[in-house]
Image (cartoon, coloured by chain):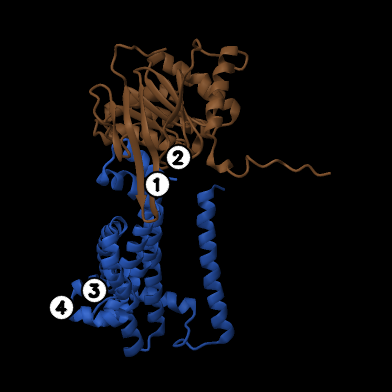
Chain colours: A blue, B brown
Amino acid sequence: MNAALRRVGLVLLSALGFVVAWGLVVAIGDYPEYILPSPQVVAVRAVDAIQSGTLQPHLAATLEESVIGFALGAAAAIAVGILLAKSLTAERVLSPYLVAAQAIPILALAPLIDIWFGGGLTARVVICALIVFFPIAIATMVGIRGTDPLLVEMARANGARGRQITRLLEIPSAMPVLFGGLRVGVTLAVIGAVVAEWAGASVGLGVLINIADQGLFDTPLMFVALGTLALLGLTFYAVVLGAERVLVPR
Amino acid sequence: MASDPGSRPAITIEDLAVTFTGPAGSLTALDGMSGEVASGELLAVIGPNGSGKSTLLRALAGLLPPSVGRIGLAPDGSPPRAGDGRVGLVFQQPRLLGWRSTLDNVTLPLELEGRPAAERRMAGERALARVGLTDAVALRPRELSGGMQQRVALARSLVTDPPILLLDEPFSALDALTRDAFDAQLEAMWLADRRTVVLVTHSVTESVRLADRIWVLTPRPGRVAADIPVPLSRPRPTSTAADPAAAAVEAEVRAALGSVHAPELVGWAEQTPEVAA
C-alpha cells in the first residue's frame, strides 16, 4: 500500500470513527431530534435538502462571498504585510490601527459595514476580507522580516536592488510563514461569510441556519448547514495546502 | 610573481578608513590602510579577530563605502560599485537560496543583470563545470555536502567572469583534509586563469601555501602592519612544511602576527601558569 493511499485511508477511517461515535452518543443518550439528531437523520435531511434544491443557493452565496472576500483580503494583506516589513514608519503609523481593528469583534463591526456598503454582496465581501486580513498581513510581515540577512548581503554584493531583493529573496523566503497565515485566514473566511450573512442577507448558509433554527425548529437542517460549512472550510484549507505544495518547494 | 611592474594595479587602496556608526556609538574597523594589488596577483590577508579583514573585502566589493580615502579598481581606477561585474565575492558560508536549484543559484548574478535565460544557463553550466559539479545542476543546496555547497558558491562568483575574486575565509568551515584539497584546486584554477585574488584567511599555513604576498593586519582599527612576499615556485605542494624557504616565510608571518596579537589575549597572555604542587 503506498503512502498516498494510506493517508486517504486514514482520513476516511477517522471520518467513519467520528460518525460512529456521534451515532453512539445519540443512541446511548436517547436525545430527541431537535437537540441532537443522529447521523442517519442528518444524512437523510441532507439528501432531501439537495434534491429539493434548498441547500444549493445558500451554499453558492456563502461560497461566492468567502472566495471573493478571501482573495481580496489576502491580496491586500500581502501588500500591506510587505509594506509593514519594509518600512518602519509604515509599521509605526499603521500597526496600532490594525491591532485595534482586530481587537474589535467582527460580529460588532458587521452591522456598521453592512450600512456603509449598502448591504449587498460588497458589504459581505468586505466583512470577509477584513477577518482574513490580519493573520495574513502579520504572517507576511514576520516572514519577510525573517529573511536571512546573510542572503540579502550576498544578493547586494551581486548587484541586487530593493525590488529585486523583495521579489527574488524576501518573498520566496517568507513563503512558508506566509502560507501559515493563509491557512488560518482561509478558515476565517468561512466564519466571516456567516457573520456577514447574519448582519444582513437573505441567502447563505448562515441564513439557512437562522431559518432552520427560528422558523422551523429544523435541527437536522441546521446540522446539514453546519456540516456544509465545515466541508467548505476543509475544502478551502485543502486548496491552500495544495497551493503550498506547488509554490513552496522543500 | 604575477605582478607586472608596467601595468596598472588591479586594486589601489589609498588611506582607507571604514567607520560604522550605530546607536551605541561608532566603531572604526579600518584606518589609514593603503596598498596595491597587482593584476593577476594572489594576495592573502591575515590578521587577528576584529582586524577588519572582512570589512576590507566588503569595501573592495562595493558593499561598504569608505569613510575616508578611496579604493580604485582596474581597468579605469574607479571605486567599486556592488554588482558592477569587476569583483566576485565568496563568503565564509555558501549563502545559497534553498528554494533554488544549483544552476539557478549559480546564475543569480546574471539574473540580477537581466540576462536572457539561454545565456544564463550556458554560463551557469560552464561555471559549475569549472568546480566539477556538472552533475549537480538540478539538485537543491540541501542535497549537497558543505564542501559541494561552497563549490556552488564559488561557481556563482565565477559566473560573471569577474577579473577580481574576493574570498572571505571560503574554506574555513571544511575539515582539514578537504581544505587542503580545496586549496590545491584553488591554486590550479588561479594558475589557469590568473585572476586577481584577495584571500582572507585565519591560517598562516594556508596563506603561505597559496599567496604571492601576505598582508598582516593590525588589530582594530586595521591597517597593513607587514607586507610579506612569498617567493616560492608554483604549483606548490599540499604541505610546504618541508620547504625551508616556506618555513622562513611562515616564521616571518607568525612573528608579524605575534607583534600584533589579538586583544582577546590581553591580561591572559601575560599570566604565568601556576603549577600545582
Residue at (35, 40) in percent of width and height: B18
**Camera-nearest label, 3 or 2:** 2
Q: Amino acid at mark 3?
A: Arg
Establish whether labels 2 and 1 are both on one chain: yes
- Viewer-nearest residue: B188 or A118: B188
Classed neighbour count for the residue bearing mark 3: other residues with Cα under 10 Å, few (<14), some (14–19), many (≥20):
many
Residue pointed to by mark 1? B27
In what element is the residue under mark 4?
loop
Q: Residue tagged by mark 3?
A: A124
Q: Is residue B100 visible?
A: no
Q: How many marks?
A: 4
Real-space CA distance between mark 3 and mark 1, rounded to the nearest whole angstrom: 56 Å
Q: Nearer the viewer, mark 3 or mark 1?
A: 1
Amino acid beneath label 1: Leu
Type of amino acid under label 4: Gly
Chain ID at mark 4? A
Instruction: Using the image as rendered, state which of residue A110 and residue B37 is in the foreground.
Output: B37
Q: Is residue B35 above or below residue A77?
A: above
Q: CA distance from mark 2 to mark 1?
A: 9 Å
Label 3's element? Answer: helix
